[in-house]
């Protein structure tokens, strides 16, 4: 009985394996018929213009002949199983070789060929400008790439030093060499003086292309930035004590480009041109250091405080002037941020005995009082340059200035396209402009660019101006078909710090709706259809303006202008049908290949042979089983 059970289990497993093998054979033989039984090596060719190229086409099945069709390097039909398409000097940009095989019926596989050419030159310039740049102003850099292909694989990268600033890709579909121009907007500050810009054209040709990707780089563009002077406030404090009979020397140092001239204004049109100034008890209470160059002027006010005691002078210098934070007073808030025309107030208190304290200001001054808490208050603040400070007489007088930021949101924010009206064209470059009118302070302004909800870019400003100004920023775009109907906007935001309003005040432009024109482009150039009861050739493609359609085939006896052909309305015989979609920007064609529905002999014999194999296995199993049972019975 044990022998019978073991034999039965063994045969059951053997039968299962044979059945599974038959099924796999069936799936393999039937599933591969949908593909053309040739292999290309490599599957895609990437070759430099004028270089040689070779690609093998091999078949692993019996056939009646195979060959290469191409305008160069064609291989006539042969019974070999490996043939090579070879061109020694490839200069035909639009070559489309394909390998064909006659196996039951003819099929073919096209070889994608990318011919590339590195640019003849890559150059960088400043648009409409020569000489030094001015800090805070906007400039346009231009990169010209000459005679490069294919443009859809081109990336232009912008660098400042070793830092990548921006990069541009291209959506045009062109196989032949073109010239391309890209631009970069910059707003240099003093840190950019001496910076080096360059642009780089790189062809990213995929895994089959050369590694690393070929690139050409422009020469370096060295920039000089002119900026107005900045006075070194560490070396020139705002309050300088002077002991009677002991003159002091003030030093005014300023950094600027061009190098600034230094002068001292002593009032009544008295100006002393020197970096140093000797002061004494006869010096006016206020003197002014003036640093001036061709870009602008910076003024630093110095309060000359006359002292009577060397000891007191020494204490005053330490507590009052060297470290103003040690003046025994507290400001609440430490910084005032107020909207133009609104109310403002700040408290000033002390916890030490004193002989009097007060507020000095052009508006809202508080006369000296013995109170320990006094408030500076203005009900309608409209003085842009107000500089209130509180003072206290505690052993000696010291003072602390209250920083005041007066802000004004813009009267308007508008967006426009520079020098263009109507629909945009895919792949071309356009300049959007954002105008911000009457905003302050500009150094706290950020202009942000959006497409839909996506932040594209933002610009800040280095000018130091307390009064309202108008500002213009631009954004370069190169839209593709996905941008048709996109909405652009710009937003002016005043980032005023923790003491300012939260969230930050902002004004937004209206929406700029982009209408984009683009030519037709099919997702694939060929489609094979097996003819059955109902055949539909759908050539519909998205384009703007809407395309017109034309059909060409030796089987069509009349012209058709619809995007779809159906066998229910048109006689569609086996063969090739070419549909061309055309609009004002270009055209694109697609070939439909209708094949006859035939009984697949391979599939048929695969089924028959699988069935026979299974039947033989079952018969053999039965015979062995009977023999074993007979032997067991005899025993």
Image (cartoon, rainbow, N blue to C red):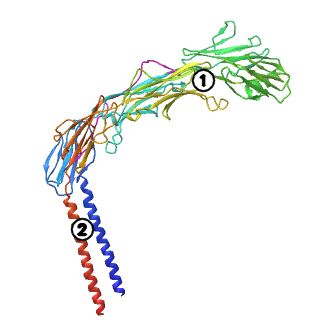
Q: In the rendered view, does 445 fall on the left or right side of 52?
A: right
Q: What stretch is highlighted in magenta?
A: 108-137
Residue 273: % across, % down? 63, 11
Label at residue 409: 1
The answer to whether residue 498 is left or right of residue 129 is right
**Residue 547: quadrant of the picture:** top left
Element carrying mark 2: helix
Q: Give residue 560's quadrant in the image.
A: top left
Using the numbered discs, state the Cα–Cα distance from disc 2 to disc 1 in whole angstroms. Answer: 83 Å
Instruction: Please tell me which residue lies in front, 605 or 418.
Output: 605
Picture quarter with the C terminus? bottom left
Location of residue 69 in the rendering, given as x and y in whole percent from the top left corner: 17, 44
Between 419 and 371, the one lying in front of the other is 419
* Residue 230 quadrant: top right
Residue at label 2? 610
Is residue 146 at least partly visible in the picture? no
Magenta span contains residue 132: yes
User: Does residue 610 appear to the left or right of 398 in the view shown?
Assistant: left
Q: Do the residues labelled 2 and 1 touch (CB within 8 Å)?
A: no
């Amino acid at each position: 009985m044990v022998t019978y059970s073991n034999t039965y289990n063994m045969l059951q497993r053997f039968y299962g394996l044979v059945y599974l093998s038959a099924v796999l054979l069936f799936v393999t033989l039937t599933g591969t018929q949908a593909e053309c039984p040739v292999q290309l090596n490599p599957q895609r060719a990437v070759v430099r213009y004028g270089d040689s190229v070779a690609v093998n086409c091999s078949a692993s099945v019996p056939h009646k002949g195979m060959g290469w069709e191409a305008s160069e390097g064609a291989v006539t039909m042969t019974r070999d199983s490996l043939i090579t398409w070879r061109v020694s000097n490839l200069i035909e940009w639009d070559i489309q070789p394909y390998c064909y095989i006659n196996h039951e019926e003819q099929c073919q596989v096209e070889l994608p060929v990318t011919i590339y050419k590195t640019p003849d030159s890559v150059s960088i310039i400043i648009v409409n400008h020569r000489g030094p740049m001015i800090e805070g102003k906007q400039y346009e850099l231009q990169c010209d790439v000459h005679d490069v292909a294919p443009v859809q694989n081109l990336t232009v990268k912008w660098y400042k030093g070793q830092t990548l600033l921006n990069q541009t890709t291209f959506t045009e579909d062109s196989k032949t060499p073109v010239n391309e121009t890209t631009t970069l907007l910059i707003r240099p500050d003093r840190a950019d003086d001496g910076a080096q810009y360059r642009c780089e054209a790189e062809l990213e040709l995929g895994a089959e292309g050369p590694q690393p990707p070929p690139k050409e780089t422009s020469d370096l563009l060295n920039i000089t930035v002119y900026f107005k002077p900045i006075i070194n406030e560490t070396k020139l404090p705002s309050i300088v004590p002077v002991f009677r009979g002991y003159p002091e020397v003030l030093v005014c140092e300023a950094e600027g480009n061009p190098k600034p001239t230094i002068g001292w204004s002593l009032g009544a049109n008295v100006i002393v041109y020197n970096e140093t100034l000797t002061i004494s008890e006869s010096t006016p209470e206020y003197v002014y250091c003036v640093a001036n160059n061709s870009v602008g002027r910076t003024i630093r006010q110095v309060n000359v405080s006359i002292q009577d005691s060397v000891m007191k002078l020494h204490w005053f210098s330490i507590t009052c002037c060297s470290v103003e934070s040690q003046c025994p007073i507290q400001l609440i808030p430490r910084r005032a941020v107020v909207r133009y025309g609104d109310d403002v107030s700040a408290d000033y208190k002390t916890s030490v005995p004193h002989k009097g304290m007060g507020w000095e200001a052009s508006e809202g001054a508080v006369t000296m009082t013995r109170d320990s808490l006094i408030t500076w208050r203005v009900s309608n603040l409209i003085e842009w340059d107000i500089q209130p400070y509180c003072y206290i007489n505690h052993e000696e007088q010291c003072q602390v200035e209250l920083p005041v930021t007066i802000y004004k949101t813009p009267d308007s924010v508008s967006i426009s396209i520079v020098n263009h009206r109507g629909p945009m064209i895919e792949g071309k470059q356009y300049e959007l402009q954002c105008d911000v009118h009457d905003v302050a302070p500009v150094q706290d302004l950020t202009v942000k660019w959006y497409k839909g909800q996506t932040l594209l870019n933002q610009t800040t400003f280095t000018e130091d101006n307390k009064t309202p100004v108008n500002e213009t920023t631009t954004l370069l775009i190169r839209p593709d078909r996905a941008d048709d109907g996109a909405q652009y906007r710009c937003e002016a935001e005043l980032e005023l710090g923790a003491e300012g309003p939260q969230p930050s005040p902002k004004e937004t432009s209206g929406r700029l709706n982009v209408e984009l024109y683009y030519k037709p482009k099919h997702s694939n150039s060929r489609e094979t259809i097996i003819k059955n009861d109902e055949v539909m050739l759908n050539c519909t493609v998205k384009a703007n303006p809407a395309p017109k359609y034309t059909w060409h085939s030796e089987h069509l006896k009349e012209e058709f202008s619809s995007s779809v052909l159906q066998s229910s309305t048109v006689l569609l015989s086996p063969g090739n049908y070419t549909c061309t979609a055309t609009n004002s920007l270009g055209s694109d064609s697609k070939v439909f290949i209708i094949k006859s529905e035939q009984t697949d002999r391979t599939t048929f014999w695969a089924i028959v042979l699988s069935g026979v194999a299974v039947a033989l296995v079952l018969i053999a199993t039965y015979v062995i089983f009977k023999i074993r049972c007979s032997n067991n019975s005899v025993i």
